[in-house]
C-alpha cells in the first residue's frame, strides 16, 4: 500500500514519532491512522523498558500551587539531555505530574519505594479483616493480594490512574514520554505541602 504524504504528516503531528517509524506503522496497519497510533504506542512502550537503566543527569524541578494556596507540590523529574529538559512539552509533562501529586497524595513513587515492614503491616490488617469470614485459606490469600494491589494503586504514584485521562496509569504516561523523546526519564522525588500539616 502506498502511504500518502498527508497521512504521514498527520500521524507525525499526532504522535511526534519519526518519519520512518510513522511510515512503518501506517504500512503495518494498512493506512489506518488510529491503529497506527496504537502500533506506535506499543512499540514505544516496549522500547521505553530498554531505556530504563540509562543515566539521567538533566531534568526539571517544578512547583505546583493549587488554587486557594493551601496545597503545593515540588517535584524533580530527570532526563538524559538538556535538550529534552528545555522542551516545553516535557515541562508540561512535569507539571502534569506535580498536579497529579497534589490531587492524589501518593506516599511513594513505586511499590519498590515502600518499606517492606509497611507492606507487611497492611497485609496483616487485611488478613485480620478476613479472620471470621469462614473462607478457604487460598481464597483469603487471593482477597488479601487483591487488597494489597488496591493499596499500591492508591499510594504509589506510578500505579495511580492519571487524573487527566483515568483510563491510563501515571506509569503508562511516563513510558509514553520515554518513547516520545527516546531517552530515559525518571520521577526522582517529590514533596507535597498542605497548610497546617507537619
Image (spheres, helix red, strand yellow):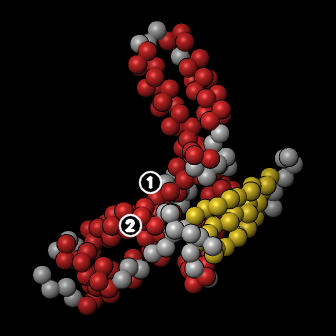
Q: Residues within 10 Å of mark 1 (few under 14, many from 20)?
A: few
Q: Which residue is farthest left?
A: 1
**Is 106 situated above or below 68?**
above
**Crowd around label 2: few <14 · some 14–19 · many ≥20 (10 Å):** some
- Please provide percent x and percent y for residue 183: 49, 73
Q: On the rendered structure, is 174 left or right of 13? A: right
Marker count (numbered): 2
**Left or right of residue 194, residue 89 in this image:** left
Residue indicated by mark 1: 167
- Residue most toward the bottom? 5
What residue is at 30 percent from the left and 79 percent from the top?
21
Q: Secondary structure at mark 2?
A: helix
Above or below: residue 78 compared with residue 150:
below
Residue identifier under label 2: 47
Q: Earlier in the sequence, mark 2 or mark 1?
A: 2
Q: Quadrant of the N terminus?
A: bottom left
Which element is circle 1 on?
loop
Q: Nearer the viewer, residue 3 or 181?
A: 181
**Can see residue 153?**
yes
Q: Residue at x 73, y 67 (%)?
A: 63
Q: Position of residue 195 (x, y in %)?
A: 84, 52
Residue 146 image point, x, y percent:
47, 32
Left or right of 82, for residue 45: left
Q: Nearer the viewer, residue 193 or 20?
A: 20
Which residue is painted at 54% across and 53% down in the image?
Answer: 158
Residue displayed at 61% across by 29% down: 120
Locate residue 43, reporting x and y percent. 33, 67
Amino acid at each position: 500500500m502506498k502511504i500518502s504524504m498527508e497521512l504521514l504528516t498527520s500521524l507525525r503531528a499526532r504522535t511526534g514519532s519519526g518519519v520512518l517509524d510513522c511510515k512503518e506503522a501506517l504500512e503495518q496497519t494498512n493506512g489506518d491512522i488510529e491503529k497506527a497510533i496504537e502500533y506506535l504506542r506499543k512499540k514505544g512502550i516496549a522500547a521505553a523498558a530498554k531505556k530504563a537503566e540509562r543515566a539521567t543527569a538533566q531534568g526539571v524541578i517544578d512547583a505546583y500551587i493549587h488554587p486557594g494556596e493551601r496545597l503545593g507540590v515540588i517535584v524533580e523529574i530527570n532526563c538524559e539531555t538538556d535538550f529534552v529538559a528545555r522542551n516545553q512539552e516535557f515541562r508540561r509533562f512535569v507539571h502534569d505530574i506535580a498536579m497529579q501529586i497534589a490531587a492524589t497524595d501518593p506516599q511513594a513513587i513505586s511499590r519498590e519505594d515502600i518499606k517492606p515492614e509497611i507492606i507487611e503491616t497492611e497485609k496483616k490488617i487485611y488478613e485480620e479483616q478476613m479472620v471470621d469470614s469462614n473462607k478457604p485459606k487460598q481464597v483469603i490469600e487471593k482477597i488479601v493480594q487483591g487488597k494489597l494491589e488496591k493499596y499500591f494503586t492508591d499510594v504509589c504514584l506510578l500505579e495511580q490512574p492519571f487524573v487527566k485521562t483515568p483510563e491510563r496509569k501515571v506509569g503508562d504516561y511516563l513510558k509514553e514520554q520515554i518513547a516520545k523523546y527516546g531517552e530515559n526519564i525518571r520521577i526522582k522525588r517529590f514533596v507535597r505541602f498542605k497548610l497546617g500539616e507537619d
